[in-house]
Amino acid sequence: MLQLTDEAPLRHAHARIRAASNRLTTATQNNTMSPRKLKIHQHPAATPTGRHPLLFIHGGYTNSYCWQHHWIPFLNQLGYDCYALDLSGHGDSEGRERLSDFGLADYAEDLAQAVTTLPSAPILIGHSMGTLVAQRYLTSAGTPLAAGVAFLSPVPPTGTSGSASRLAMLHPEFFTEMPNVLSGDTTEHSIRVMAEVYFAPGMAHDEVEQFLHMVQDESDHAVTEMAVLPFMPMGRRPDIPALVMGGSADEVFPASMMFFTALAWKAKTITVEGSGHMLMLDPQWAATAGMLADWIETIP
């Protein structure tokens, strides 16, 4: 049994979470968005169709490039205008020098700011940590704007602590190799370990290597919040179409955990056979994007 012998760190984490939640509520009520300069990558459809725009929210330790490699060109060809947000301190957005000041509420403010720039209500598509950002935005005070939401490889409502423990048992070298990747000291061994954790079994070595350049540091604040997620307040969930999708070979958040997110959001669930955590980059990316597109087509 796990015992917390010192409650001070946990109390401090809870205080930071409450403060972040209050910031998002106040910003939404006052309609004042974050002053940070954000990069929203715009990718218009090959042929405009007037469909809902798609707004992509990346996960932790990465940026919006993960969407731009395969999925956005694919969905552009189907007639969807696509927008990919770099969260504060990520990719081409401001804030890298103070990354660890940002929490999930700050990222939700980023999303709220991005939504206001779009021509109509978007369908939100979040991956991993990005699913929590979408949830924070959708359950905030005020009137969040979204026609639907897709949660890909979602962080479970129980948070990341269980996943970290599981990775420590099954892939202990991940925790020694991840700092090497973040610092740019990537080795052949690093690539093999990252492939085992993040990608589908059998992912080609050169494909894994080409995607590692988009790995970056993540906010300590946000990482802490994800670990204590069950203690974070959650507002009322809007009644909008929702999808939960994950890979059967996801080593970060096993497919069995999708049930809990789907239950909370009354969502359709799709398990992609053989895919890992990075659904949009795995060899199955085209089939997975097609499944997503089929679901999007059902949204009026």
Image (cartoon, rainbow, N blue to C red):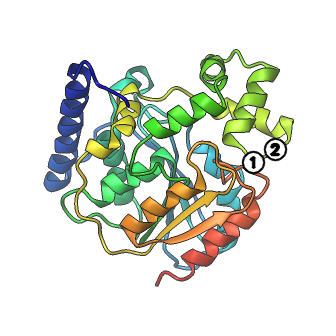
Label 2 vs label 1: CA separation?
6 Å
Residue 196 in view in this figure: yes
Q: Which residue is mark 1?
A: 200
| Res 297 → quadrant | bottom right
Question: Where does residue 7 sit, x and y in percent of width and height?
Answer: 22, 23
Q: Element under label 1?
A: loop
Q: Which mark is residue 192?
A: none
Q: Nearer the viewer, residue 154 or 116?
A: 154
Q: Residues within 10 Å of mark 1 (few under 14, many from 20)?
A: many
Tell me: residue 257, above or below residue 45: above
Question: Where does residue 174 sit, x and y in percent of width and height?
Answer: 64, 26
Question: Where does residue 126 sit, x and y in percent of width and height?
Answer: 49, 55
Locate residue 245 relative to residue 17 in the image: left or right. right
Residue 215 in view in this figure: no
Q: Nearer the viewer, residue 113 or 222?
A: 222
Q: How many marks?
A: 2
Q: Nearer the viewer, residue 242 or 164?
A: 164
Q: Amino acid at mark 2?
A: Met
Tell me: residue 167, above or below residue 40: above
Q: Tell me, yes or no, whether the two marked residues, 2 and 1, touch with CB atoms within 8 Å.
A: yes
Q: Residue at x 25, y 47 (%)?
A: 33
Tell me: residue 111, above or below residue 90: below
Locate residue 209 relative to residue 261 in the image: left or right. right
Q: Residues within 10 Å of mark 2 (few under 14, many from 20)?
A: some
Q: Which residue is mark 2?
A: 203
Q: Element under label 2?
A: loop
Question: Where does residue 274 sit, x and y in percent of width and height?
Answer: 75, 56
Q: Residue at x 73, y 37 (%)?
A: 196
